[in-house]
Amino acid sequence: MEGRKLQLAGKSTYLVSLPKRWVLHTGLRAGDTLFVDTEIDGSVSVRPRAVEKPAERRKVFVEKGEDTRDHLLRKLIGAYTSGFGLIEVRFPPDRAPFVRKVAREYCRLVIGPEVIEENRNALVIQDLSDPSELSAEKCLRRMHLTVRAMVEDAITALRTANESLASDVTLRNQDVARLYWMVAKQNHLTHTSPRANGGGTNDLATFHAYRLIAKLIERIGDHAQRIVSTFPVLTSGKGLDPKFAKELDDARVSAVGLLDQAFTALFTRDIDAANATIDGRVAHQQLVDALFHKIATRRGEELLALGTVVDSLGRTGHYCGEIAEQAIDLAVLLNPESA
């Protein structure tokens, strides 16, 4: 691969020279039209001839009255993450209200799909999202910021008995799931699309790593939601003991710090920062173990609820370490000299 300098002509036109060997090989001449397209990974392709857009992959489901709401919804999400641009659901007329309700719920849950056709026996959903506008990296950055705030707000909601903040943490977890499904879909398309495969082994490995990292972030979001699920128990009566609440907040600060450090390592390809994140799990686990020791004398529902909160903070630190491990793998792959 060779680098070429981007030049500015006038006030708004950018130019880059083309390899002479490629121009001669394709038979191009001055004045010919080139065709430029943005790929799903954000890169740009230049072709001497127009390429027909491949027909969108279509998945057909036949609803015979045996599926529950969750079963049909899982199949629709599975088709989405597998890269099907069109999903058709066929059903007997008496099942139409059920299918339409689930289809519209599905369209609200994920990014892009809309119902474009429907009749008495079928409906068609099309994915209208443009991966080039919301890349996997952008999804990860948004997931990081969302989940970071969720962890902070989950502990704050317990400390301040703020029910509306606890409810908002639960709502934001769905936003994290939407972004995860988008990353999963882009990873699948990158590995199955002939045009995407032209990006090379490194691009495929990067998308695969982003898919794994997105799942880890989603799990952290799930644990933030798990923390606020204890709200009814821990905010009734006297609430949290102030001293224990302060130590709980220290563990929260530690977990968020590890998360930020892991993401800095990921996007800067900084192996030292990634190693610092992994090593930092030891100190974080010490905070978690101390909290477990302090709640050992509690009983009943309070013990279960506090154990849930402390366990989720511990698992959050563990997932941050796994994100850092993926960051090291990517740094070594993409910048071999940095190792």
Image (tube, grey):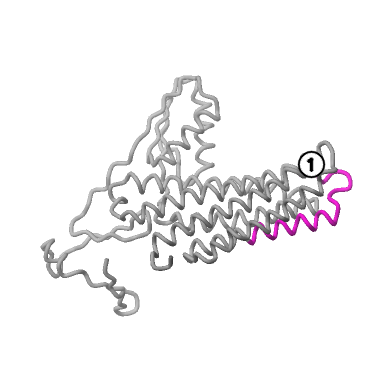
The residue that disc 1 covers is: 232
Q: Quadrant of residue 92?
A: top left
Q: Is residue 319 magenta?
A: no
Q: Residues within 10 Å of mark 1 (few under 14, many from 20)?
A: some
Residue 192 vs residue 65, the one in the foreground: 192
**Residue 157 position within the rendered picture, expressed as x and y whole percent measured from the top left:** 75, 52
**Residue 282 position within the rendered picture, expressed as x and y whole percent measured from the top left:** 65, 57
SS for dot 1: helix
Q: Residue furthest bottom?
A: 10
Residue 115 vs residue 134, the one in the foreground: 134
Amino acid bearing label 1: Pro
- Examine the residues drawn in magenta and state their main secondary structure: helix
Quadrant occupied by the N terminus:
bottom left
The boundaries of the magenta stretch are 231-257
| Numbered circles on residues, count | 1
Q: Is 329 situated left or right of 240 in this image? A: left
Quadrant occupied by the C terminus:
bottom left
> What residue do we see at 61% from left, 47% from top?
173
**Residue 128 position within the rendered picture, expressed as x and y whole percent measured from the top left:** 41, 46
> What residue do we see at 74% from left, 59% from top?
250
**Residue 223 position within the rendered picture, expressed as x and y whole percent measured from the top left:** 65, 46
Residue 174 vs residue 282, the one in the foreground: 282
Q: Is residue 240 magenta?
A: yes
Q: Is 23 situated left or right of 329 in this image? A: left
Q: Is 308 situated left or right of 187 in this image? A: right
Q: Quadrant of residue 4?
A: bottom left
